[in-house]
Amino acid sequence: MITIYHNPRCSKSREGLAVLEKSGKEFKVVKYLEELFTEKQLIDILHLLGISAIDLVRKNEKIWKDEFKGKELSEGDIIKAMVANPKLIERPIIVNGKKAVIGRPSSNILSII
């Protein structure tokens, strides 16, 4: 089953959702600002994406700039920051089995559906 981790207020996330809707494939929508990630879920997604935690952070978010930017943070610290502040997580994230992509640009989604 394909899963999209979605923020309805984000235009890029809405574009990703539209790609999935057009595909005709079955998928599940997880509004990750309401259904929060656990540390384990986020670690699993990072492994599927093949990136480090810092690469999933939205570095222009005010909370990142105010509380985390310029600090020496471990991988675990960054994951904890994203779990506690899900707005920091790049979006949308699409997972299909053992593959995942960040849907920016939305054409990335086509590579895994």
Image: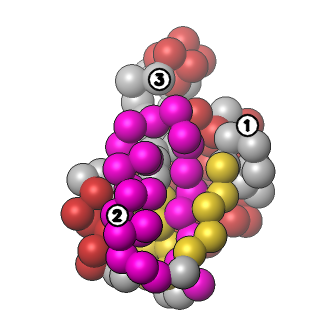
CA neighbours of label 2 inside 10 A, class few (<14), some (14 to 19), many (20+): some
Residue 15 visible at all: yes
Callout in the foreground (2, 3): 2
Residue under label 3, please give it: 61
Residue under label 1, please give it: 84
- Residue at 75% over, 43% down: 34
How far apart are the two marked residues, 2 and 3, measured between alpha carbons?
A: 26 Å
Q: Is residue 82 left or right of residue 18?
A: right
Relative to the observer, which residue lies in front, 15 or 24?
24
What amino acid is found at the position of numbered circle 2 in the picture?
Answer: Val
Residue under label 2, please give it: 19
Label 3 vs 1, first from the N-terminus: 3
Which SS class for mark 1?
helix
Callout in the foreground (2, 1): 2
- Residue at 40% over, 30% down: 59
Horizontal and vertical percent for residue 72? Answer: 51, 32
Whether tag 3 and tag 1 are in contact, CB under 8 A, the answer is no
| Residues in magenta, as a range | 1-25
